[in-house]
Structure formats: structure tokens, C-alpha cells
Image (cartoon, coloured by chain):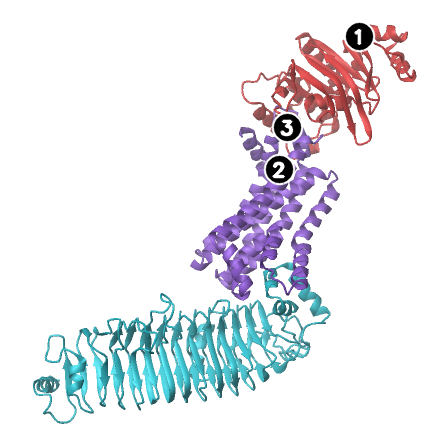
């Protein structure tokens, strides 16, 4: 300890002559009053400590393999006019800093922290306030973005930037972050082998999570809550989404999770609660949707007829205005072993599955599909009458969209195929149920 | 005014009727307690109450109300041979019908909530609106019952007309709306639907409530039109005014009938 | 005290009253006599405002009867068939009427005693016999010392002792200067105490005058025959 302090003093006194790992201390009243000045003297392997204080300086460019770590209260201020930090070197760690106030830009993707064409970066425990874009990774590999807290300025203005934005990168881990008030909370485009885990993305202006063309990524145990449009993911193969919570995404075009042109993916053990549409499948093929909970959504699951060969198994549907909606009498997906709270069948052979198939698409759901204004009749007794008549004498609802093995009982969690870390979080959520 | 209060007091003392009203209150008490046990006080859990408010309150009020007025014949005759104004007696009897039913409904819903320890914060506006809608529907169907009992002398026929009116407003009218939406699906329907909604007190109350829940989001553009109109405070006030009108107009006709009636 | 002019009333297609004129003075008993459905009860109820006349006018002490109903403070009414809220007791109803009439009204509970009502006043009305209800009914009509008493078939269903008590009461009230209207079937013991007899048939007054005048006009020796002759003689000729 004493040696470290001594070393630090030496470094400050004679920064350019020391050998090996040095520590440069940035201090408002000290020899290095700005981060930029410290970086100008830094060499690969150096450690820069930013003491408490507000630093107003031009965009900081990191060109060496350094660790910049902020003391509590170390604030980098973009003064509403410029990006705050750009990292262009490999193996850089940015830790514990507060970035604030980048201002807006119509011409550039101005970010509080931009990592460009680098490998092995770590961005940890930082705070970003009023960033246009928050943390922006561009052509990086093997980077970790962990435990950051981002609160954007979107919503107050018309246009916001994304919270954690990753573009054309590989093997990026985004974990434990909290993102609010941005355009999209977490944005992936052309990313492969990404891991997005344990994040909370809430109250964003558009999507909580938005990715496209990002194959082989895993999204687990995240919470996506109260985003204007929920979560939308597109044009991607081999995605795994496990144990996430999609909650309270209400709005005319809000989805718990929208899958558009997603193929060969797994949606497992997630919870969809109180969304306009829980899970929406459009042109989504060969996906496995299993062990999820759909509770109190407008539509639990909406599946368009251009989605094929999906398997919807072992999910639970409770308290949704419509459990399943579709735009056609055709159906090319399989439903099996789900629990439907509307199921009124019996189980004479006592194998736990109803003996008569369940048709989860209500007639009224079809009416609404064709004539959305008819929704004002929701919860009118006429609608119940209509559905009853259709159940007794099915004529219009798609007879191929049937669950041949509807579960009789609300399944406990072991039956819902949860695995690994996904389980603990979902369990916590589910334990409140009777 | 004095006479009205006296009449209300006599009506409140009427033991047999009170038994009905108490049963009615108990029904809401049990129902609300069950709902709270099962689903908590979130807006979604309150949803099941909505069906009851929209379906059950009109039914009970119109049936009970028709029986009430027929059962009040003797009382009416007795009092009208006294120095009592007809309209004062009418107002007293009307209040004697609507007040206990409204009170039973409100007590049945709010007592369990208080015992449960209040409501979820985002449920409060919905709950208040639901109480308002329930009371308004009680007034509306109380007025309709009054009108029916005032026009149809025969007790059984009056009950038949009452049930028919209820069916018309809860089922037939919605069937008509459904037919309209499906027939004119390719035309702009928002405004006609808004008008059709205002033409039926049950729909007015229902739409007012579901707009606070899920529907406005689910309806997309139409929902936006409705939500803008009925979701705001002005729209809510207009809907409540609409409901008040629905109580006032049949009530005034009933009063006219009551004034001219030969006993 | 009461003056009725050209009273007409139809119920549906049925002409119940067809231009009735009748005056009732203080200090007299007017018997309105007539067969069933001759309009006696309807006439009474028009005076009370329970039934609205189609045309014609009624004044009470010179004032037209109106919606206000205040004039009814001067009237005591004993309906033919008393219909009360069934689960109330006689005492409840008397208390209620007192309440409605307001304070400061002279009360006359004589009949409560003389008709021996004390023991039955606390039973719900629905358990009481027709006669007992009729006695309560009579007591209530006199309860507030009204200037005008309208008694519809008052002795029907009463035992002879009670009927006697009631007749005695009627006489005394007349002597105290009150006006009384008593309706009865064609024949009734009450005709004896009537100062004036109005004979109502098919909606109009066929005879209006004293008992002696009636006998004289019909040339009959008994009231019974006189009335029978009025009913049989179609038309009886203008009696007035």
C-alpha cells in the first residue's frame, strides 16, 4: 500500500521516465488536470486513476492499452456539445466513470463512450447520464460491457440514441446493465456470438432490445419492461432467449417480443406479462417456444400464417384477453402440451392431458383481426356468447391450430423446461403465483 | 325536501327489502374478497369486477326496482291520501331504491379493499371509475325500472319487460354493434361506434372502463380515437354525463307517468 | 265545503263518471249510494287526488284541488279495502302518518280506544283479519280531526258493536260541524244517518236530496223500495 502511494507520487513527479505499469492520477487541481493530458503521457499497460471532480475537455481519445478507472464522483462532462470518449486500442478497461451530457446530434451517432475497432475491451460499472448514444461498440471482438447504469435523455426530446449499441462485432458480453430513457435500450446489428444476460432495459423510447442480423446470440435472464414498443428482433438465426421477462409493454404497436424472420431459435422459460402482444411471430420458422408463461397480455401469442414449423409446447397461458391470435385459417405450426386457463375439457384417462384438443383461437379474435374496431366489444357478454357458439359448433376458427394435448393443471416450474441461470430469476418471479 | 327525506327513511326501514339489499352487498363483499385473494388489487385483477358491474348491476337493479315499485303501491296509496306531494313521494321512493343499492355495491367493493390494506396505486383511478360507473348504472337501471313499473301495471308483465330491456341493452345492442362493425368493416367506424356506445348506458360504462385497461392499446388507431375521447378527463366527464342523462330522461318520463297515474 | 262540477272520468273504454255535480256541506253527512261499479269510489278518489278527472273541477273550501296536496291535510280517508305496507304494524303506520302530517295537528285517538285497538296495534298488518284491519282503518281516518271525512263502505266487514261505535262517532263529528261523505252499496244501515242521499248510477247522479225528498220523489214508503224504483225506472226522470 505504502509502496503504491509512493509509486504514484513518483509517477506524477516523473511520469515519462518510469518503467513497467505506472499509475497516472488525474486530479482537478493536480499536475494532470484532464484525462486527455494523462493519456498524452500514457503508454500501453498504464493505469489512469481519475479523482473526484468534473472534467470538461474535448473528446478523449484512448490509443493505448490502458485502464482508466474513476473514483466515486469522477465525472466526464460533454458539455452538451461533443462525444466524451473514444477508445481505439485493444484491451482497454473503462471503469467507474460517470459520463454525462453529450447533447444531441442529427449528423453523427454521438456516444458517451465509443469503442472502435478494438479487441478485449471492458466497460464496467460506469454511469451514463443524458447520453445521446450511451456505450457504442463498433467492430469489436471479445468485449465485456458489465454493470453500467445508463439513463438517456430520450423522450424529453423527439429523437434519442441507443443505450448500448453494438455493431458488426463478435463475442460481446453485455451483462448486469441497467438502461433507461434511450431510443433502444440494447441494440445489436451484425453481431455474432453475443451474450446478453441479467440486464434491465426499461422505459426506453422505442425498443428495450433490438437486434438484426445477429446470429448465434444468447439472451438470458434479462428484464424488458415498459418500453414504448417492447422488444423487436429480426432477420436472425440460431438465437436463444431464456428466462427473460417481458413486462408491461403497452401501446398500439408494443410487443413483449416480436420475432420477425427469426429461424431455428429457442424461446424458453420466459415470462410475458401485461403486454399488448406477448410474443409475435411474423415469418418466423422452425423455432421452439417452450416453457414460457403468457399472463395477462392483450394477445398472449400472435402468430401470422407466414410462420412455419414452429413448435409451441409446454407453455402456460393465463388471463390473456386473447391467448392466440392469427390472421388466417391456415396454420403451419405445432401446439402441444400447453396449459390454457380457458380449456374446458376433461381427462378421463388421467394422464394429466385433456382428452379433447383445445382450440386456442377465439372466434372473436378472428373478428378483431379483420375488424379491429370490434374490440370495443371486449368483455361484452355478446362476445362470450359468440365464443361459446363457436366452441359448440366450430365453423370459422382455424381447425388446424389445435393443441392436441392441453395440460390439465398449471405446471410447476420443473415441467417448464427451465435450465441454468434462467431458472432462478424466473422462479423468483413465478413464486408469487398461487 | 322534508317529505322526501321522510319517505327515504321509511323505505330504509323496510325490513324485507333490506334483506335483499344486504344479500346484494354480501355478494359484492364475497366476490371482491375472492378476487383480492386470487389476484391482488392490480388493474387486471379488478377486471373480473368489471363484468359484474356491467352485467349484474343492471340485472339486479332493474328486476329489484320493478318489484320495488310494485311493492310500493300500498305505501304510495296510503301517503297520497295524506298532504304529500306526488313528486316529493316519487323522489323519496326513487332515492329509497337507488341509495341502498348503490351503498350496498360500494360497501361490498370497498370494505374488502380496506381490510386488504388498500389498493395498488395504479388501480386507484380504475377503482374510482368503477365505483362511479356502478352507481351510475344503478341510477340508470333504477330509472328504467321506475319507468317500466309506472307504465306496465301488471307485475309479471312488468318483470318481463324489465328483463327484456336488460337483454336488449346488454346483449342485443352489442350484437347490433358487432353486426355494424362487420358489415361496414371497410369504412371508418370510429365515430359511428362512439355514437353507438353513447346510445347504450351499459356500453358506455363498459367502454369507459376497458379503455383504462387493455383495450386502447390493443385497438390501435380506433383505440387512439376512443382513448383520446373517453380516456381523458373531458371524455370521462362526458361519459359520466351521458350516463346521468340516461338516468335523467327515463326518470323524468317516469315522474310524468307517476304524476298522471290513477291509483 | 266541497263542490264538484261536471266530473268525467273514463278508464279505457269504460265511462265511470259521466258529468257528476255534487256539493258537500259542513255539518252534514252525505251518503253516496249506488250499485257496484257506479263510480262511488272513483268519485272519492278524485276528491283525494288519487285519481285524475278527465274534465270537470273540484274545489275544497273554494280552492281548486292541485298537485300540491296540502288541502289533503283537511281530509281523513277510510278506503274500502285498506292496503298498507304489510310488514309494518298499525302503530308504525300511525306514527308515520303523524310524521307526515307534521306537528301541531290535533289528534283524535278516541276510536283507538273505543274500537279496542290497543292489543292489535303492535302486530304486523299482514297477520290481522279483515275486520281488524278495517277497524284500524277507521281509527286512522279520524286520527287527525279532519274537516272532511271520506268513508268508503265503512261498516263493511265490521262487527255490529264496532259498526255501532263508528256510527256514533260519525254522528258526533257531524254535530261538531264536520263534513262527511259516506259511500255505500244500494242498501246500508248508514243511510239512516245520512242527511242527504246522492244516488249514483252508471256514472251520473240520478237523485240528490234528503231522505224524505227521496221517498216523496219516488212515491215509495221505504228507502229500499225508493232506490229499487230508481234503479228499475229507466229513465227515472230528472229528480232535481
Residue annotated with mark 1: C210
Q: Is residue A280 above or below residue C158?
A: below
Q: Position of residue A4 (x, y in %)?
A: 12, 86
What hue represents chain B? purple
Q: Which residue is rendered at x = 49% and y = 76% of the image?
A: A257
Q: Nearer the viewer, residue A169 or A430?
A: A169
State the hue of chain A: cyan
Q: Is residue C17 left or right of residue A42?
A: right
Check the residue under mark 2 and report the chain it is in.
Answer: B
Element at badge 1?
loop
The residue marked by circle 3 belongs to what chain?
B
- Measured from the top left, where is residue A234 in percent x and y? 48, 82
Chain coloured red: C
In front: label 3 or label 2: 2
Q: Estimate the spatial distance between the alpha carbons at disc 2 and disc 1, rounded to whole Å.
A: 48 Å
Residue located farthest toward the bottom when viewing the structure as drawn:
A19
- The answer to whether mark 2 and mark 1 are in CB contact below 8 A is no
Q: Is residue A245 left or right of residue C168?
A: left
Left or right: C56 with respect to A45? right
SS category of the residue bearing label 2? helix
User: Measuring 30% from the left and 90% from the top, which residue is drawn there?
Assistant: A118
Amino acid at each position: 500500500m505504502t509502496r503504491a502511494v509512493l509509486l504514484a507520487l513518483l509517477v506524477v513527479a516523473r511520469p515519462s521516465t518510469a518503467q513497467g505499469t505506472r499509475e497516472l492520477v488525474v486530479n482537478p487541481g493536480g499536475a494532470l488536470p484532464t484525462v486527455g493530458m494523462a493519456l498524452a503521457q500514457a503508454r500501453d499497460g498504464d493505469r489512469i486513476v481519475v479523482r473526484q471532480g468534473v472534467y470538461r475537455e474535448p473528446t478523449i481519445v484512448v490509443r493505448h492499452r490502458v485502464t482508466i478507472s474513476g473514483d466515486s464522483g469522477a465525472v466526464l462532462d460533454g458539455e452538451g456539445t461533443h462525444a466524451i470518449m473514444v477508445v481505439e486500442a485493444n484491451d482497454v478497461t473503462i471503469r467507474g466513470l460517470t459520463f454525462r451530457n453529450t447533447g444531441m446530434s442529427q449528423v453523427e451517432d454521438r456516444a458517451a463512450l465509443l469503442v472502435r475497432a478494438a479487441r478485449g475491451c471492458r466497460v464496467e460499472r460506469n454511469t451514463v447520464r443524458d447520453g445521446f448514444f450511451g456505450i457504442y461498440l463498433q467492430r469489436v471482438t471479445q468485449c465485456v460491457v458489465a454493470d453500467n447504469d445508463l439513463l438517456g435523455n430520450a423522450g424529453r426530446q423527439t429523437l434519442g440514441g441507443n443505450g448500448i449499441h453494438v455493431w458488426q462485432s463478435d463475442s460481446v458480453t453485455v451483462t448486469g446493465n441497467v438502461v433507461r430513457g434511450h431510443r433502444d435500450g440494447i441494440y445489436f446489428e451484425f453481431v455474432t456470438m453475443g451474450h446478453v444476460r441479467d440486464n434491465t432495459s426499461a422505459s426506453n423510447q422505442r425498443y428495450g432490445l433490438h437486434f438484426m442480423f445477429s446470429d448465434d446470440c444468447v439472451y438470458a435472464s434479462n428484464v424488458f419492461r415498459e418500453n414504448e414498443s417492447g422488444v423487436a428482433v429480426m432477420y436472425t438465426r440460431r438465437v436463444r432467449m431464456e428466462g427473460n421477462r417481458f413486462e408491461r409493454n403497452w401501446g398500439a404497436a408494443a410487443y413483449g417480443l416480436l420475432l420477425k424472420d427469426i429461424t431455428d431459435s429457442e424461446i424458453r422459460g420466459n415470462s410475458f406479462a401485461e403486454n399488448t402482444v406477448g410474443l409475435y411471430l411474423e415469418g418466423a420458422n422452425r423455432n421452439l417456444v417452450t416453457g414460457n408463461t403468457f399472463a395477462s397480455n392483450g394477445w398472449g401469442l400472435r402468430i401470422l400464417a407466414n410462420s412455419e414449423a414452429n413448435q409451441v409446447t409446454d407453455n402456460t397461458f393465463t388471463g390473456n384477453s386473447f391467448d392466440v391470435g392469427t390472421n388466417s385459417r391456415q396454420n403451419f405450426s405445432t401446439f402441444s402440451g400447453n396449459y390454457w386457463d380457458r380449456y374446458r375439457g376433461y381427462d378421463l384417462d388421467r394422464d394429466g392431458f385433456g382428452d379433447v384438443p383445445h382450440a386456442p383461437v377465439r372466434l372473436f379474435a378472428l373478428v378483431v383481426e379483420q375488424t379491429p374496431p370490434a374490440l370495443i366489444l371486449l368483455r361484452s357478454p355478446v362476445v362470450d356468447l359468440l365464443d361459446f357458439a363457436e366452441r359448440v359448433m366450430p365453423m370459422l376458427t382455424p381447425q388446424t391450430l389445435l393443441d392436441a394435448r392441453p395440460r390439465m393443471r398449471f405446471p410447476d416450474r420443473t415441467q417448464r423446461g427451465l435450465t441454468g441461470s434462467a431458472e432462478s430469476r424466473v422462479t423468483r418471479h413465478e413464486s408469487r403465483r398461487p | 325536501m322534508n317529505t322526501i327525506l321522510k319517505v327515504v327513511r321509511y323505505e330504509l326501514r323496510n325490513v324485507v327489502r333490506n334483506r335483499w339489499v344486504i344479500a346484494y352487498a354480501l355478494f359484492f363483499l364475497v366476490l371482491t374478497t375472492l378476487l383480492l385473494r386470487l389476484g391482488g388489487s392490480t388493474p387486471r385483477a379488478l377486471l373480473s369486477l368489471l363484468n359484474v358491474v356491467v352485467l349484474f348491476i343492471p340485472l339486479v337493479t332493474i328486476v329489484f326496482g320493478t318489484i320495488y315499485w310494485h311493492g310500493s303501491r300500498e305505501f304510495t296509496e296510503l301517503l297520497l291520501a295524506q298532504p304529500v306531494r306526488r313528486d316529493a313521494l316519487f323522489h323519496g321512493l326513487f332515492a329509497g331504491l337507488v341509495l341502498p343499492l348503490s351503498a350496498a355495491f360500494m360497501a361490498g367493493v370497498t370494505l374488502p379493499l380496506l381490510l386488504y390494506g388498500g389498493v395498488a396505486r395504479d388501480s386507484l383511478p380504475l377503482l374510482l371509475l368503477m365505483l362511479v360507473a356502478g352507481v351510475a348504472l344503478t341510477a340508470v337501471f333504477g330509472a328504467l325500472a321506475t319507468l317500466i313499473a309506472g307504465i306496465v301495471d301488471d307485475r309479471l308483465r312488468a318483470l318481463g319487460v324489465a328483463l327484456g330491456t336488460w337483454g336488449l341493452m346488454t346483449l342485443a345492442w352489442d350484437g347490433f354493434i358487432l353486426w355494424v362493425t362487420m358489415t361496414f368493416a371497410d369504412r371508418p367506424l370510429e365515430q359511428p361506434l362512439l355514437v353507438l356506445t353513447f346510445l347504450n348506458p351499459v356500453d358506455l360504462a363498459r367502454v369507459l372502463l376497458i379503455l383504462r385497461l387493455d383495450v386502447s392499446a390493443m385497438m390501435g388507431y380506433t383505440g387512439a380515437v376512443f382513448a383520446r375521447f373517453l380516456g381523458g378527463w373531458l371524455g370521462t366527464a362526458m361519459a359520466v354525463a351521458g350516463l346521468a342523462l340516461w338516468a335523467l330522461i327515463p326518470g323524468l318520463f317516469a315522474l310524468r307517468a307517476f304524476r298522471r297515474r290513477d291509483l | 265545503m266541497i263542490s264538484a262540477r261536471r266530473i268525467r272520468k273514463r278508464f279505457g273504454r269504460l265511462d265511470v263518471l259521466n258529468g257528476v255535480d255534487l256539493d258537500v256541506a259542513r255539518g252534514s253527512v252525505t251518503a253516496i249510494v249506488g250499485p257496484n261499479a257506479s263510480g262511488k269510489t272513483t268519485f272519492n278518489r278524485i276528491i283525494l287526488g288519487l285519481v285524475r278527472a278527465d274534465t270537470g273541477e273540484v274545489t275544497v273550501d273554494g280552492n281548486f284541488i292541485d298537485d300540491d296536496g296540502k288541502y289533503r291535510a283537511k281530509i281523513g280517508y277510510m278506503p274500502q279495502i285498506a292496503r298498507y305496507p304489510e310488514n309494518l304494524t298499525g302503530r308504525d303506520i300511525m306514527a308515520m302518518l303523524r310524521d307526515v302530517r307534521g306537528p301541531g295537528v290535533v289528534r283524535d285517538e278516541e276510536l283507538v280506544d273505543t274500537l279496542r285497538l290497543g292489543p292489535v296495534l303492535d302486530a304486523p298488518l299482514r297477520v290481522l283479519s279483515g275486520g281488524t284491519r278495517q277497524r284500524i282503518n277507521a281509527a286512522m281516518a279520524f286520527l287527525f280531526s279532519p274537516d272532511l271525512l271520506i268513508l268508503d263502505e265503512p261498516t263493511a266487514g265490521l262487527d255490529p258493536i264496532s259498526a255501532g261505535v263508528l256510527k256514533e262517532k260519525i254522528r258526533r263529528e257531524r254535530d261538531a260541524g264536520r263534513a262527511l261523505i259516506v259511500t255505500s252499496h244500494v242498501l246500508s244501515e248508514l243511510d239512516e244517518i245520512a242527511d242527504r242521499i246522492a244516488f249514483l248510477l252508471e256514472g251520473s247522479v240520478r237523485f240528490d236530496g234528503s231522505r224524505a225528498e227521496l221517498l216523496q220523489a219516488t212515491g215509495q214508503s221505504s228507502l229500499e223500495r225508493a232506490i229499487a224504483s230508481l234503479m228499475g225506472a229507466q229513465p227515472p226522470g230528472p229528480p232535481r
